Image: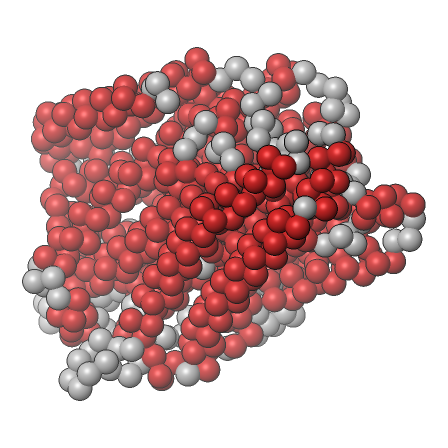
Amino acid sequence: MEPAAYAKIRRNPKFIELVQQRNRLARTLTVVMLVFYFGFILLVAFAPGFLGIPISEGSVTTIGIPVGLLVIVSAFVLTGIYVGKANTTFDNLNQQILEESK
Amino acid sequence: MRGQPRILGGLAGLGATLLLAGPALAAGAIEGATTTQPTNWSAIGMFFAFVLFTLGVTKWAASKTKSAADFYAAGGGITGFQNGLAIAGDYMSAASFLGISGLVFTSGYDGLIYSVGWLVGWPIVLFLIAERLRNLGKFTFADVASYRLQQTPIRMLSAIGTLTVVAFYLIAQMVGAGKLIELLFGLPYLWALIIVGALMIAYVTFGGMLATTWVQIIKAVMLLAGASFMALMVLYSFGFSPGAMFQAATEVHPKADAIMRPGSLVSDPISAISLGLALMFGTAGLPHILMRFFTVADAKAARKSVFYATGFIGYFYVLTFIIGFGAITLLMGDPSYFKTTVGADGATTYNKVTDLIGGTNMAAVHLANAVGGNLFLGFISAVAFATILAVVAGLTLAGASAVSHDLYASVIAKGRATDEKEIRVSKIATIVLGIVAIFLGYVFEQQNVAFMVGLAFAIAASCNFPVLLMSMFWKGLTTKGALIGGLLGLISAVALVVLGPTVWEKTLGNPAGSAPFPYDSPALFSMAIAFVGIWLFSVLDRSQTAKNESEAFESQYIRSETGLGAAGAASH
């Protein structure tokens, strides 16, 4: 790899834009996942009674069931959001940057 | 690509053979059923068919495996969807299938807490690791960690991290395999180990990553299909109403309503957070999982594979939760699944949890019999065996790569080894690892090895993950910092597990309450030690090499973000 390509990319404002935007999205989604998961774990540790409240009068199904499922589904949805954005918008930008570095 | 239609055609053929052979083979089991553990012929027949088919795949893979890139990374030709299935296959081990459904059977809701922890590591892998790993590395995660650092110390550290994780994970899988197969197939323990060891050596040495990946994909599809069928049958018997299923479960389970809320599994906040950290970040440091990102063409495919894997794994955990509750409702009322005692008054009694024949981990297997009869029991048994086989093959390949690519090619031969030599070393390492795995499985037969998977995750989270993460994101990282911090993380994780209650009291037999370290999971502490160690010893390093390493960060950063120069990494 010729060093010139690296220098070109470093000076390309699109590179700064790509890195800033993609990393901002990744950071945000990481924080959301951490909050969801450790929120769940802290509920388990500090407020197990809350997760044990029935979802409706006379039902044995507790709030804990939909909450647990929600964390599982959120993991899938968050990866979907990231891949959707990264594989289209960001990869297009990335492609332009690589073209311009030649 | 060209092999795919043949594989699918073979799969259909396999199904037809199974349908024909099944009942005849199953009939044999009835004749042989005496007081000893009967040999389960339908299970053996189906497993035999799986083995023949996967050996066929291995033969095909062997004809395509020529270069080192083929051997370690399947030539980079796996698609995102295929890799997603393979990753899910690596992750859905027999331990998680039988263990989590058994945990749900025993404690209900607590099983879900574990499942969630095991899943949430995946988004983190995607957001922080996957594409950078693909852009920077070639065959092992050490390629990335040592990208701008000194090769010899960092490769050695990564190899130690890899081999320790692989060793503990392998012991847990081998002991589990031996016991499971003894129970399901009526085969002696040592035979089971030898069969698993020999087959895994065959897959890896002849077919490399391509065979290992396809074995994993086939098994993942079988496991997902079998588990889906079981969950569907359970829900069907409750008119597709989960509420009715939970209602029935609380009526029959000895713990009654308590199975619907968090129980005693997670006792205090420190343990809860520490366990959560190990599960979440351990995933991002498992060498056999990280290696899978080098089998796809580019960062785009690497991202897609995590998306599919997260979907499959999440779906699988929902299934195991339903299967566990299904086992509660459909097994607990039926004495034929339990070791019963006839009391003085002539009444038959049994503990609805602990007396389950073969232990609580067999809940899913017994449920297979309850919803699908003996033939389906055979299928699920064969799937469980296949699962162990596929997981140990993946682990062994990761261990062998650390020996051949990191230790031999980079440290000993200083990058001057030819492809042929490197592959030969890798094959020898595979055979040695296979024999060691059989030996360790035999030695640890009578030990409680349940803690070893947790230990593997803790080490992965405390040694491999911090070094990898810091090498990607922190300009100031130096060789000295990575080496000392990584080793501190590794040593503290192992030491704290040994000093913790599970090993100190239950395994070593010291009195209860005497454990010097009060928590079961060390990750909260060992991860902190690793990160602080890496930071401190990097900052203190004022040598010229340290300056050069930090200056080299910029080009690494550009490559990791854009993939510049990475496209052909796997294909030459």
Of B433 and B353, nearer the camera is B433
Q: Position of residue A37 (x, y in %)?
A: 45, 68
Residue A82 visible from this viewpoint: yes
Q: Residue at x 7, y 62 (%)?
A: B239
Q: Residue at x 50, y 24 (%)?
A: B75
Q: Position of residue B118 (x, y in %)?
A: 44, 57
Q: Quadrant of the N terminus of chain B?
A: top left
- The answer to whether residue A61 is left or right of residue B481 is left
Q: Quadrant of the C terminus of chain B?
A: top right
Of B310 and B528, nearer the camera is B310
Up/down of A67 relative to B153, above or below: below
Q: Residue at x 55, y 67 (%)?
A: B274
Up/down of B350 relative to A56, above or below: above
Q: Position of residue B506 (x, y in %)?
A: 51, 62
Q: How is the image coloured?
A: secondary structure
Q: Residue at x 92, y 48 (%)?
A: B543
Q: Quadrant of residue B223?
A: top left
Q: Quadrant of residue B67?
A: top right
- The answer to whether residue B3 is left or right of residue B289 is left
Q: Quadrant of residue B81?
A: top left
- The answer to whether residue A81 is left or right of residue A26 is left
